[in-house]
Image: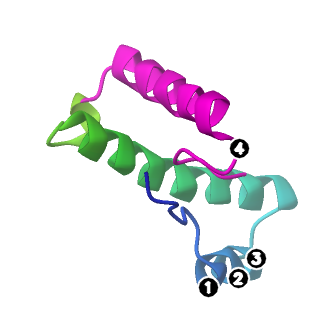
Amino acid sequence: MNEKQYLTHAEALEVEAALLSTHEKFLTRITISSLRMLQQIADDEQVAKIEDLTPQQIIKWFERDAEIKRAQGETAGTLQW
């Protein structure tokens, strides 16, 4: 799988410059990243729209990504923390 950036440096700077509390900035970064992650999951699951993803599909996607990491090492898989 390809490593993907879910929040660009420029976007992080925009969030940091926003007139938001520290907690609100954190939630904003998480939300932007989550949107991109859900799009990746929808693409991988061949689901046309994010809103059509089921919780089960999301869980299975995370399980597969974790399995890839266990089998191939921490730098494998999609999610890189």
- Across and down, in percent, residue 21 comes to 82, 62
Is residue 49 positioned above or below 81 on the image?
A: above
Q: Residues within 10 Å of mark 3 (few under 14, many from 20)?
A: some
Task: Tell me the crowding category of disc 1: few under 14, some 14 to 19, or many 20 or more residues within 10 angstroms, Cα based.
Answer: few
Question: Is the C-beta separation of discs 2 and 1 under 8 Å?
Answer: yes
Relative side of 77 to 18, left or right: left
**In this figure, which residue is indicated by the disc labeled 1?**
10
Mark 4 or 3, which is nearer the eye?
A: 4
Q: Describe the element under mark 2 as helix, strand or loop.
A: helix
Residue 67 in the image: state x and y as whole percent.
Answer: 56, 25
How far from the left and from the top, in percent, is residue 9?
66, 80
The residue identified by callout 2 is 13
* Sequence-wise first label, 4 or 1: 1
Task: Identify the residue under disc 3.
Answer: 16
Instruction: Tell me the distance, in whole angstroms, between the alpha carbons under discs 4 and 3.
Output: 29 Å
How far apart marks 2 and 1 lie (CA) works out to 5 Å
The amino acid type of the residue labelled 4 equals Glu
Tag 1: amino acid: Ala
Residue at x 63% of width, y 58% of height? 28
Q: Amino acid at mark 3?
A: Glu
In the image, the segment drawn in magenta is 53-81
